[in-house]
Image (cartoon, helix red, strand yellow):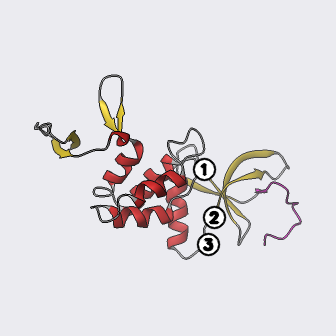
């Protein structure tokens, strides 16, 4: 099912497999594309609060604040939500906002972070520069500070545990505290 929103005053789209909506949309929430007008990334994310699960909404929010080419900033999301208080989707969007982190790299990284926290573990640090067992700097990875564990996505895009990595600046003999 595709959801399409028309500006207030225009007729809502009616087609098979399309759910048409008509809403008053402020101009700053509309992005004029080459062929079609769409809602802004923040407005789209807010509208998804009524459709997605909390976890998927957090994943979408992390995507907006991703490390490479972010579509928004935390401050902009906070300001946007401040204007939406009392609207449908606001409570779930606020719950998601509390779990969203900037500078993430992948949906699987967000999933792993949420699973670890839900299991009662401390939240892993995001994008910690890592050294492998030979002391070579590798990719930035989520890091769980309470024990010497780093996580990365495998080529199959499923989280795998990496035992011989350590944060940049730590020696192999340093305690992991």
**What secondary structure is found at the residue carrying circle 3?**
loop
Please name the predominant secondary structure of the magenta segment in the image.
loop
Residue ID for mark 1: 103
Mark 3 vs mark 1, foreground winner is: 1
Residue ID for mark 2: 124
The residues bearing labels 3 and 2 have C-alpha atoms spaced at a distance of 6 Å
Pointer 2: residues within 10 angstroms few (<14), some, or many (20+)? many
Residue 133 to residue 116: above or below: above
Start-end of magenta stretch? 165-177
Mark 2 vs mark 1, foreground winner is: 1
Q: In the displayed structure, does residue 11 sit left or right of residue 147?
A: left
Picture residue at 45% right of the left edge, 58% below the top? 58
**Which quadrant would residue 163 be assigned to in this image?**
bottom right
The answer to if 175 sits in the magenta stretch is yes
Residue 37 to residue 145: above or below: above
Instruction: Identify which residue, 15 or 177, lies in the foreground.
Output: 15
Residue ID for mark 3: 122
**What secondary structure is found at the residue carrying circle 2?**
loop
For marks 3 and 1, the one nearer the N-term is 1
The answer to if 105 sits in the magenta stretch is no
The residues bearing labels 3 and 1 have C-alpha atoms spaced at a distance of 18 Å
Pointer 3 with pointer 2, Cβ within 8 A: yes
**What secondary structure is found at the residue carrying circle 1?**
loop
Instruction: Identify which residue, 122 or 34, lies in the foreground.
Output: 34
Spot occupied by residue 105 in the image (x, y as percentages of width and height): 58, 47
């Amino acid at each position: 099912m595709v959801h399409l929103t028309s500006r207030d005053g225009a007729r809502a789209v009616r087609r098979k497999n399309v759910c048409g909506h008509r809403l008053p949309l402020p101009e700053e929430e509309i992005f004029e594309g080459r062929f079609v007008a769409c809602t802004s990334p923040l407005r789209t994310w807010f509208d998804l609060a009524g459709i997605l699960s909390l976890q998927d909404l957090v994943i979408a929010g992390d995507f907006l604040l991703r490390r490479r080419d972010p579509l928004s900033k935390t401050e902009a999301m906070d300001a946007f939500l401040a204007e939406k208080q009392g609207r449908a989707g606001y409570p779930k969007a606020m719950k998601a906002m509390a779990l969203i982190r900037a500078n993430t790299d992948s949906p699987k990284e967000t999933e792993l972070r949420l699973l670890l926290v839900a299991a009662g573990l401390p939240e892993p640090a995001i994008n910690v520069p890592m050294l492998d067992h030979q002391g070579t700097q590798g990719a930035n990875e989520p890091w769980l500070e309470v024990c010497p564990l780093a996580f990365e996505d495998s080529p199959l895009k499923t989280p795998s545990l990496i035992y011989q990595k350590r944060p940049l600046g730590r020696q192999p003999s340093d305690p992991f505290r």
